[in-house]
Amino acid sequence: MNAEERQNFPASILWLLVALTLGWGFNWPMIKLALTQVPALSFRSACLLGGAAGLFAIAAGSGLRLRPPRGQRGRLLLITFFNITVWNVCVVYGIGYMASGRAAILAFTMPLWGVLLSAWLLNERLTARRVLGVVLGMGAMLLLLSNELQAVQAAPKGTLLMLGAALSWAMGTVMMKRYPVRLPVASFTAWQLLLGGIPIYAGAFAFEMHDLRPLSPGPAAAVAYNILVSFVFCQWAWIKIATTVPVGVSSLSTLMIPVVGVFSGMLVLSEVPRWQDFAALALVLLALATVMLQPGSVRALFRMK
C-alpha cells in the first residue's frame, strides 16, 4: 500500500493536528471580536501581512529556501487564489452576517467538498471509511445547525459566503496535491499569505483607511491572536498536514475544529451547551476515528481479552 492509499493519520504529525484544532477552533470568536472595531479587509490585511512576515522570518532564520522555483510560480498563484484570497474574503464578510460558531460550522463543511474533489481530480479512492467519515461529520454539522436553521435561512448572504469559503478551501487543498510547489512549508505558506492578500490589501487601502481607529484591549488581543496563532502557526500547520497526507484524510481531520469553535463561543459568550452539541461531538469523534485508526485496529481491540 503506497502513501496515497494510507487512510490512517500519521502519528508523527498528530500533535500538529491537536494544536491546529485548538488554535483555529478558538479563533472563530476571536475573529468576531476583532471585527467589532476593525474593518473586515483591514483586519485580514493585518493578519496576512503579519503572518507572512513571521513565516518569512522563521524560514530565513532557519536557512530555508525562500524563492519559488521559476517554473512553479503559476501554480503557486493558482493555489494561493483558492487557499487564501477567496477563503479570506468570504470568511470576513460571511461571519458578519451570523454568529461565529454558526459560521465555523458552515466553513467546515470543507471535508465534504475535499473528499469529492480529491476523488474527481486526484483519483483518490472513495473508500467506505472516507464515505462513513463524511456522513458522520456532516451529520454532526447538521446537528449543530439544527436549532439555528431559521437564523441561517435569514442570512442567505452569510450562508452562501461561508459555503463558498469551504468550497474554495477544498479546491486549494486539492490543488496543492495536484500541482506541488517545491518549497519548504514555511516559505510556501509565507508566499501564499503575502500574494493571496494583494487584492485584500488594495481593497483595504482604497475603502477602509478612513475607518481605522485605535483599538481597545479586547479587539487588539484578538488581532494579535489571529496573526501569531491563526496565521503564523495554524496556517503553517495546516499546509504541513495537507501536503503530507491524502486530501481525503486531511479534510476529514479538520472536523473537530468547528466543534471547538462552537464550545469556545459558548465559553466567551457564557452560553449553555445543548444536547445537540454533545451529540455532534460524539459523531465528530467517530468520524475522526475513520482516518485516525489503523485498519483493523477496532476489530483487534474487541478481540482482546
Image (tube, rainbow, N blue to C red):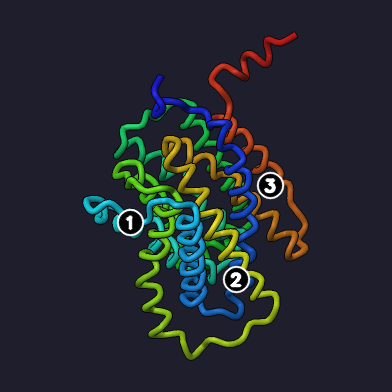
Mark before the other along the chain sequence, 2 or 3: 2
Whole-percent x, y for residue 50 in the image: 51, 68
Label 2: few (<14), some (14–19) or many (≥20) C-alpha neighbours in 10 Å: many
Q: What is the three-letter code of the residue carrying label 1?
A: Arg
Res 27 quadrant in image: bottom right
For image coordinates 56% across by 55% down, the residue present is 233
Image disc number at residue 67? 1
Res 37 quadrant in image: bottom right
| Label 1: element kind | loop
Label 3: few (<14), some (14–19) or many (≥20) C-alpha neighbours in 10 Å: some
| Label 2: element kind | helix
Q: Seen in the image, is 141 located left or right of residue 272?
A: left
Mark before the other along the chain sequence, 3 or 1: 1
For image coordinates 53% across by 32% down, the residue present is 9
Q: Seen in the image, is 74 located left or right of residue 15?
A: left
Disc 3 or disc 1, which is closer to the eye?
A: 1
- Residue 299 visible within the image: yes
Q: What is the three-letter code of the residue carrying label 3?
A: Gln
How far apart are the two marked residues, 2 and 3, measured between alpha carbons?
A: 31 Å
Say above or below: 263 vs 243: below
How far apart are the two marked residues, 3 and 1, measured between alpha carbons?
A: 48 Å
| Label 3: element kind | helix
Whole-percent x, y for residue 138 in the image: 53, 43
Mark before the other along the chain sequence, 1 or 2: 1
The answer to whether the residues at label 3 and label 1 have Cβ atoms under 8 Å apart is no
Q: Which residue is mark 2?
A: 223
Image disc number at residue 85? none
Q: Which residue is mark 3?
A: 276
